């Protein structure tokens, strides 16, 4: 049997992405102070997130590649990529 009083409060928690309102429910031990309603009407502990896979540029495909940043990478390479003869010796 498990010991009483030593385990975290593992329960269903409603996570909400504050940037776009995306909601999902999963089981978690996250401490929460607020309650929120799910789309099906259940009242669950609410945990607010700044970003999720629904809003992060890497997962949404809107992240810019380093190579197409207006020539900044090439400008850096031209300026600092070359070594002088004294430094390479």
Image (spheres, rainbow, N blue to C red):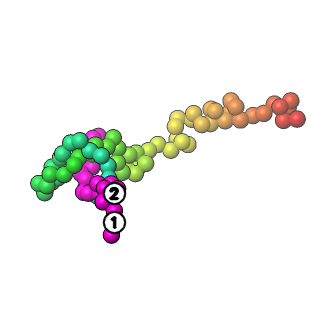
Give the class, few, some or many, for how many residues have Cα within 10 Å of label 2's Cα (few <14, many ≥20): few
Residue at 31 percent across and 56 percent down: it is 5
Q: Earlier in the sequence, mark 1 or mark 2?
A: 1
Residue at 62 percent across and 32 percent down: it is 75
Secondary structure beneath dot 1 equals: loop
Who is closer to the viewer here, 4 or 72?
4
> Would you say the magenta stretch is mainly helix, strand or loop?
loop
Mark number, residue 7? 2
Q: Which residue is mark 1?
A: 2
Residue at 14 percent across and 51 percent down: it is 43
Give the class, few, some or many, for how many residues have Cα within 10 Å of label 1's Cα (few <14, many ≥20): few
Q: Which residues are magenta?
A: 1-21
Per the image, is 3 magenta? yes
- The quarter in which the C terminus is drawn is top right
Per the image, is 41 magenta? no
Secondary structure beneath dot 2 equals: loop
Give the side of residue 26 with respect to residue 40, left or right. right
């Amino acid at each position: 049997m498990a010991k009483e009083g030593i385990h975290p409060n593992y329960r269903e928690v409603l996570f909400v992405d504050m940037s776009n309102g995306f909601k999902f429910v999963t089981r978690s031990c996250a401490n929460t102070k607020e309650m929120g309603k799910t789309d099906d009407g259940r009242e669950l502990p609410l945990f607010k997130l700044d970003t999720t896979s629904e809003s992060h540029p890497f997962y949404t495909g809107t992240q810019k590649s380093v190579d197409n940043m207006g020539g900044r990478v090439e400008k850096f390479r031209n300026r600092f990529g070359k070594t002088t003869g004294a430094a390479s010796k």
